[in-house]
């Protein structure tokens, strides 16, 4: 989506921090470790891309977030097959509920120390997806919203609580969407004080979905089939009424990518017409709202004469500027996370930044030029910052809370942001210990991440 991304599918990241048990399943968290993504790709290849479903139960893996922008250069393109809809104007979900579904919005305490996901929307507003004893069911995550920079919070959970990690996306403080694995698509126009639902099209599921809204009214959903036997694993839908109805655009052909198999695809639209879908074998670009697609070949990175694209962990759009975080490897080299940027809505790309898959970093999106990254491992917190899409960097040592490491961030400016800090593991090396809850405590910074204060 445009502006400050808060999903991440997006980012998803894109797309989308939490994830449910099966670590071979790709979520759309805002931040995560690149070695996890690489492991997922290797697992999917080893299993010959056998279909898999997520298993209920909470587990989290972090996927690195990068924000970059820059001038692209020409890359090869060829036509990709897209099956047009037989009735592109038919609404996939025509029925409107008689009125908004009431969602209680009591004032609640602060998010606590079991925060799973966060998103800053603007200078005053944001959301947190948390495990809270104030939930109607102990241990079930709830969505909290704030309108005063975190001084107070209210329950903004849709009426039907998610069984899986949902995709959460807001384009402003009022307009947002929550998509659970089994649907429906929940939408709000008042910052989560009330919600309306839209049923997903028959045969489609949100468990492997991707979502991109370019405004409060216009957006796209890439929905997977709820069966691996479906001849159309992926179908793109468009809405022009904020999600009240979904119009089928057409089936999107992603080679060798059955639904529920391998890293999940992501989608990002720069405007109502131009967008990109990135799968784990191909990157596609459209300039006619998804009616036709072109295959985009990513250029070689430094030291790689024949890059091999093997999946996406981030796809975000800031108007015509897009960033794609991909796993790139050669015939004899391991897969390494590499950031590509486009300045022309995804038609051409250039490599912008690459790092070792063993590095443990989390990246903050500020805008198309300004981004930050922080170490996530236990110990001193190192921070890098750039204001020119990665051409020049400054490095400093930050001061995070003691005995905690940073695991996710969300910034609205170069100075103001949130983070989730997780308690460092005390499990001895080589020992078998219970899995640490994939959650932490909310913290805030007003100096670009140099210092952090935990939110009680």
Image: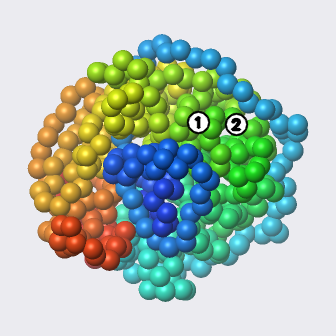
Residue drawn at 18 percent across, 67 percent down: 429
Residue 271 at least partly seen: no
Q: Position of residue 40 (x, y in %)?
A: 44, 50
- Helix, strand or loop at mark 1: strand
Q: Position of residue 201 (x, y in %)?
A: 79, 55
Would you place residue 242 above or below residue 294 in this image?
below
In the image, is 184 to the left or to the right of 424? right
Q: Position of residue 158 (x, y in %)?
A: 61, 71
Residue 347 at least partly seen: yes
Residue drawn at 18 percent across, 47 percent down: 383
Q: Using the numbered discs, state the Cα–Cα distance from disc 1 to disc 2 in whole angstroms.
A: 9 Å
Quarter in which the N terminus is drawn? top right
The residue beneath circle 1 is 277
Along the polypeptide, which appears first: circle 1 or circle 2? Answer: 2
Identify the mark at residue 252; answer none if there is no mark: 2
Residue drawn at 16 percent across, 54 percent down: 381
Mark 1 vs 2: CB contact within 8 A: yes
- Helix, strand or loop at mark 2: strand
């Amino acid at each position: 989506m445009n502006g400050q991304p808060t999903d991440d599918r997006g980012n998803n990241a894109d797309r989308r921090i939490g994830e449910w048990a099966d670590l071979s399943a790709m979520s759309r968290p805002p931040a995560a470790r690149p070695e996890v993504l690489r492991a997922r790709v290797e697992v999917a290849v080893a299993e010959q891309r056998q279909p898999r479903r997520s298993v209920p139960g909470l587990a989290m893996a972090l996927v690195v977030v990068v924000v970059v922008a820059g001038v692209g250069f020409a890359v090869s393109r060829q036509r990709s097959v897209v099956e047009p809809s037989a009735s592109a104007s038919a609404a996939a979900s025509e029925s409107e509920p008689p009125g908004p579904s009431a969602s209680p919005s009591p004032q609640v305490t602060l998010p606590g120390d079991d925060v799973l996901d966060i998103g800053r929307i603007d200078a005053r507003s944001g959301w947190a997806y948390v495990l809270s004893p104030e939930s109607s069911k102990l241990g079930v995550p709830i969505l909290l919203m704030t309108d005063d920079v975190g001084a107070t919070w209210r329950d903004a959970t849709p009426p039907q609580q998610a069984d899986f990690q949902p995709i959460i996306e807001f384009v402003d403080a009022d307009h947002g969407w929550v998509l659970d694995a089994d649907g429906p698509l929940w939408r709000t126009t008042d910052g989560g004080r009330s919600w309306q639902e839209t049923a997903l099209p028959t045969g489609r599921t949100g468990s492997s979905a991707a979502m991109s809204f370019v405004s409060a009214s216009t957006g796209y959903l890439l929905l997977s089939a709820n069966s691996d036997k479906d001849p159309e694993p992926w179908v793109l839908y468009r809405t022009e009424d904020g999600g009240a109805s979904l119009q089928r655009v057409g089936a999107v052909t992603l080679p060798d990518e059955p639904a529920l198999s391998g890293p999940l695809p992501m989608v990002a639209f720069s405007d109502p017409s131009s967008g990109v879908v990135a799968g784990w074998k191909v990157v596609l670009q459209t300039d006619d709202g998804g009616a036709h697609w072109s295959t985009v070949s990513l250029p070689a990175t430094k030291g790689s004469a024949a890059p091999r694209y093997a999946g996406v962990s981030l796809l975000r759009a800031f108007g015509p500027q897009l960033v794609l975080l991909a796993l790139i490897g050669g015939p004899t080299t391991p897969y390494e996370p590499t950031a590509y940027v486009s300045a022309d809505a995804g038609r051409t790309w250039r490599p912008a930044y690459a790092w070792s898959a063993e590095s443990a970093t989390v990246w903050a999106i500020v805008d198309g030029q300004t981004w930050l990254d922080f170490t996530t491992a236990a110990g001193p917190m190192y921070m890098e910052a750039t204001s020119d899409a990665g051409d020049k960097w400054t490095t400093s040592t930050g001061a995070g809370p003691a005995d905690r490491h940073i695991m996710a961030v969300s910034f609205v400016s170069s100075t103001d942001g949130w983070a989730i800090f997780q308690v460092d593991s005390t499990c001895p090396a080589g020992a078998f210990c219970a899995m640490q809850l994939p959650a932490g405590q909310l913290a805030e910074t007003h100096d670009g991440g140099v210092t952090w204060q935990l939110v009680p």
